[in-house]
Image (cartoon, coloured by chain):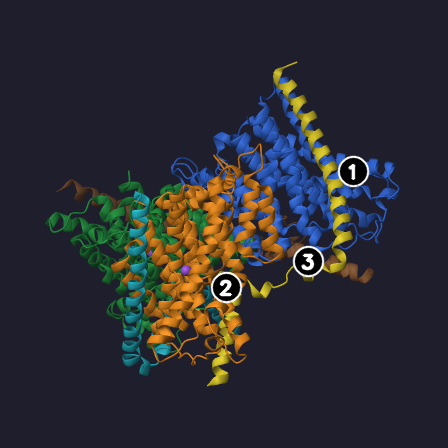
Chain colours: A blue, B yellow, C orange, D cyan, E green, F brown
């Protein structure tokens, strides 16, 4: 098990796999498996971090607030239809949930509905959301789910391009998109409040996650609390990331992690990513059928989240087809839409399976 | 069909449905918001009107202002000594 | 109730009403009132912030430490007699306490002595002190008290000038004050220790508040722990402000906030500010009667605290009467004296009414 | 007269009294302190004497010093290679 | 007792005695002894800091993580044999433990084995290690132990030179050491993992301390999480230092501190420092007997830890004997070796005496 | 001999022994590590190979990248307006 911790550190340091999370998680995993000392259980310090930050939900919510303070909704506001792409890509979550339940039906593995939901959220491609949901629905699977989520987010440049090339034609990939309009400051200020209002009406169970996210974003855009916004984006999110990572690492103890379920989670998580990528692209193609204003279907893949990696991948694949085709900003719209979409899905999963 | 499977199908239909409906409503609401704000506020150059007196009314907890104040005082003293 | 949260955000963002606190408080208030999800009660994250930071008293004390680290006692030390102005302005606290009790006598509203004391502290015009006292004496009124305190602090430029003009003559407003002397570093280092010593002898119940305040100030002035002082003034106070604001917002739930008592608190809080302003000015006039060294009575209004707004208001009104009359630094003396004065009053209120 | 009213009057008298007495004592104590310190310490130029060896004795927790140290080492190495 | 707090502040501010810790500790000590108010017991804020940060062990561990993030193992890796010096200097810990037990045998004072172990750790000359061990083994002696540890660390420039001159000849002090080799980044990355592996095998009870230390160092050296490393070295360690210091101060209440044991602790702590210094030097002389590559025995004194003060003292004494003799970097090796050595000793003490 | 004294002697022998053995093992392990790494990795210039794509694969939580992105966008817009 210590080897897995070392492997995570190797991937993080040498291959640059989401190092901000995988360095603390990997190191925490090593500490948790040292025999003869209780670091990850009882009064051990990593277990204390877990109890104070993940059982309570505080760490992932604070991180999500920080992510909100770092998010620019400009590209999304300039082209709100890209929200549909962020919606479609969440199908990966629910397909994987079905997959986990199907595995249970075959008798190969046994997942409860709560566990299946926690596994599905890997398809949301959003770290704090995955940790929040897993902490609420299936704490004993948290280690595997977090590792899967961050590993696949790091692997997006390898996972997505083949699917993107398979589902799009050369001419589709060449589609150039029109310049995005400027978005005014007041739109950016009102948007988080609008989003929160809709959450309150339609999916209140998503309000903790999206509320903290919108709060962070409002601090950023309001322009009157820059010192709070700066601290949220720096000292606060960094401190929380360190303790969150170590706390997640406390769930990598061999007796909890080295079980057949972990293998199932890793496989299902990969499936979730692939399906989310595919449905995002297909939704973009469907929108092109129904609308005259064509969008490049590559940006649909960015709907899974994995901000900003997925948007960069869309840009790169687009450039390969057409060297004048800069998709980065167009892909940021579905990219942040995917964050909203998976947080909404997370709210429903917690309400449905957490009761 | 097992109980868990039924539940799962319900959850998938309800969940994916909510995600789609929610984001569709959000598309509409966002467009409406942008339309309204662009119609009523753009001419006023919001960036300016939004912060009428940023420098004139922050709280005790703003060190920049305190720093500015003490710099001003220092200058004042130097000018008068 | 959500409208009140939006109103607070509007005032904070658009009118710049104490945005550092009212953005988190307003947003927290919105989150607390979303039906169908427990964010401000039970295991909800805002209630957790409340329980860990306000029930324990830790958040306001840490903020007060940060305020201490930001406070320059130089102007006060150069002219210690301005402490009398800071004393006089605290009469607003006690007059309001009497007002709350009088309201109870009429049968219109019903406040216990602890509640009346918590309402009175609004007159101290000091945010963390008000939150600390309300958290100790009347947690169920905390939302209304905090909102009143910060709103009126933001309204100081509107509330104070009419009272200042009413109670002073044109010639009094024209009084120019003599240049303040330089204060040596050693005086600034010894002062927080001297203050703490007197607190320990005379009002030990004010020692938590003034102790943290003096500690912050000593870190600032000692010159040997600049890295601690810098962090206190930046990352630490910012992080605490965010969580304090959200925690206060958790007390804005409709069932607790939309009660007749809130209206009473808002009215009484306004009265407290006005009386404090008036007694500060009158004390300055009294001192002019007894001493040959004249002071401009406008700086008496700064004795309510509301640092540094009240000092700026005194400066502005002074400039209107006499364009060569720079009162800012002279008003900083009573301004910080008001912080000390209301913390002393807070200690007495807690000791007397908290038992 | 109700019990609460009596209590309130007591509290007002005691509280306002304490505030005034406390700050009056503080005025006196502050003046005394300033007088004493100005008499005995000003000539020694306190800013200088107070920090005789700031650079010479900070703890492990000071990264500036470590940075300076490592810069010095780097320089030393470069000079000797 | 308040006088002792003031004395600590005086030493910290005026004499620059470890001000980063002694300012908060001294001030906390004053607050704890104010009669008529509970700040350091029960619901008092300093007791809350103590309960949440020292009883749990979290504060010293987080500080140790920060120290790890500030430590450069380069000089140690360039000359690993200096680890022997860091080992030898830990004899001060165990000699003092024996001394405390011997005092008990005489009947003068009465220390249990756990108390004796906690006193011995002062000889480790490492603040967070001392606080961690004392918090685990003898919380009632924590105040005296922390004060002794930090005071003697500040006194290193006075304590060590006479011992160094006594135990070395002029010609030994003149020994120039060869230029240290460059250490590659990969060695610096692998070293904390290697160290942790050996800890896991040989002294798992030291894994909390050295694990956090190695984690901080890995964040520093890996180069992929610079934002986490920067925050750890600044905002996080500063915030933790403030609260750690205040929490330690809560253990300076007169009834706990003004006891004969404190005097014993102060004397024993001084003895520990002296013995550690001496054994470090003697080990260096022994190594010179056995090896052809001579080392300057002055750097053995740096093995007690007291980073980076002890290394600077070695450098200074070396320069006095030979103006071309720059020992600073050579002394940094045993200096950080001493940190490792005392953390290993701490693990053994906790395992042996904490059961 | 008292019980505490016996315990203390045990602890000293065991403790000091462990410290010495541990650090001796660490000396050996460190030398071995340095030898192995210098033999197998130095020629590849580790500083370069260790971070093949620092700029290409950081997470959402990196504001520098977001800042760079938005600067790029701004420039792009300016170039096209
Ligand atoms: Na997503
Ligand atoms: Na006040
Ligand atoms: Na040591």
Q: Quadrant of residue E303?
A: bottom left
Q: Nearer the viewer, residue A165 or C61?
A: C61
Which residue reaches farthest top? B1
Q: Which residue is mark 1?
A: A281
Q: Is residue B68 above or below residue E44?
A: below
Label 3: chain letter: F
- What label does residue F68 carry, if any? 3
- What label does residue C160 carry, if any? 2
Q: Is residue A259 left or right of residue D5?
A: right
At x 25% / y 67%, what residue is drawn?
A: E163
Q: Is residue A165 left or right of residue B58?
A: right
Q: Mark 2, residues whose alpha carbon is within 10 Å: few (<14), some, or many (≥20)?
A: many
| Disc 2/disc 1 C-alpha distance (Å) | 61 Å
Asked whether the beta carbons under mark 2 and mark 3 sit within 8 Å of each other, the answer is no
Label 1: chain letter: A
Q: Is residue E163 above or below residue A282?
A: below
Q: Is residue C233 left or right of residue E11?
A: right
Discs 2, 1: same chain: no
Asked whether the beta carbons under mark 2 and mark 1 sit within 8 Å of each other, the answer is no
| Disc 2/disc 3 C-alpha distance (Å) | 47 Å
Q: Nearer the viewer, mark 2 or mark 1?
A: 2
SS at mark 3 in the image: helix
- What label does residue C203 carry, if any? none
Q: Nearer the viewer, residue C272 or A68?
A: C272
Q: Is residue D9 left or right of residue B72?
A: left
- The residue at label 3 has a CB less than 8 Å from ligand 1: no
Q: Nearer the viewer, mark 2 or mark 3?
A: 2
Q: Position of residue C23 (x, y in %)?
A: 56, 51
SS at mark 2 in the image: helix
Q: Is residue C194 visible?
A: yes
Q: Position of residue B30 (x, y in %)?
A: 73, 44
Q: Nearer the viewer, residue E286 or E202?
A: E202
């Amino acid at each position: 098990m210590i080897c897995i911790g070392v492997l995570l550190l190797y991937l993080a340091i040498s291959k640059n796999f989401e190092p901000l999370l995988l360095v603390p998680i990997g190191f925490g995993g090593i500490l948790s498996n040292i025999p003869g000392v209780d670091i990850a259980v009882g009064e051990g310090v990593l277990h204390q971090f877990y109890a104070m930050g993940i059982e309570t939900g505080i760490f992932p919510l604070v991180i999500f607030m920080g992510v909100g303070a770092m998010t620019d909704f400009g590209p999304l506001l300039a082209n709100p239809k890209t929200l549909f792409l962020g919606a479609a890509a969440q199908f990966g979550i629910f397909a994987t949930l079905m997959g986990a339940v199907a595995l249970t039906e075959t008798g190969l593995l046994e997942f409860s509905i709560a566990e299946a939901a926690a596994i599905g959220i890997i398809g949301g491609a959003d770290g704090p959301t995955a940790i929040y949901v897993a902490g609420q629905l299936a704490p004993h699977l948290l280690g595997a789910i977090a590792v899967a989520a961050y590993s696949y987010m790091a692997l997006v440049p390898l996972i997505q391009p083949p699917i993107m090339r398979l589902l799009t034609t050369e001419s589709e990939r060449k589609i150039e998109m029109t310049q995005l309009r400027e978005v005014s400051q007041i739109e950016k200020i009102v948007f988080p409040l609008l989003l929160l209002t809709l959450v309150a009406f339609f999916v209140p169970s998503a309000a903790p996650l999206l509320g903290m996210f919108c709060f962070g974003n409002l601090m950023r855009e309001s322009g009157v609390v820059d010192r709070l916004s700066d601290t949220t984006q720096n000292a606060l999110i960094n401190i929380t990331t360190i303790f969150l990572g170590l706390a997640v690492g406390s769930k990598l103890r061999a007796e909890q992690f080295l079980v057949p379920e972990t293998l199932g989670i890793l496989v299902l998580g990969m499936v979730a990513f692939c399906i989310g990528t595919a449905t995002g692209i297909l939704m973009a193609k469907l929108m092109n059928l129904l609308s005259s204003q064509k969008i490049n279907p590559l940006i649909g893949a960015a709907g899974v989240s994995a901000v900003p990696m997925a948007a960069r991948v869309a840009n790169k694949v687009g450039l390969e087809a057409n060297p004048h085709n800069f998709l980065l900003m167009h892909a940021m719209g579905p990219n942040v839409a995917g964050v909203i979409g998976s947080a909404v899905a997370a709210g429903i999963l917690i309400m449905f399976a957490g009761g | 069909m097992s109980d868990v499977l039924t539940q799962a199908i319900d959850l998938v239909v309800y969940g994916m449905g909510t995600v789609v409906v929610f984001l569709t409503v959000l598309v509409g609401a966002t467009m409406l918001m942008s339309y309204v704000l662009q119609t009523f506020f753009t001419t006023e150059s919001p960036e300016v009107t939004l912060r009428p007196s940023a420098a004139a009314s922050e709280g005790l907890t703003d060190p920049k202002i305190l720093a500015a104040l003490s710099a001003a005082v220092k200058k004042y003293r130097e000018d008068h000594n």
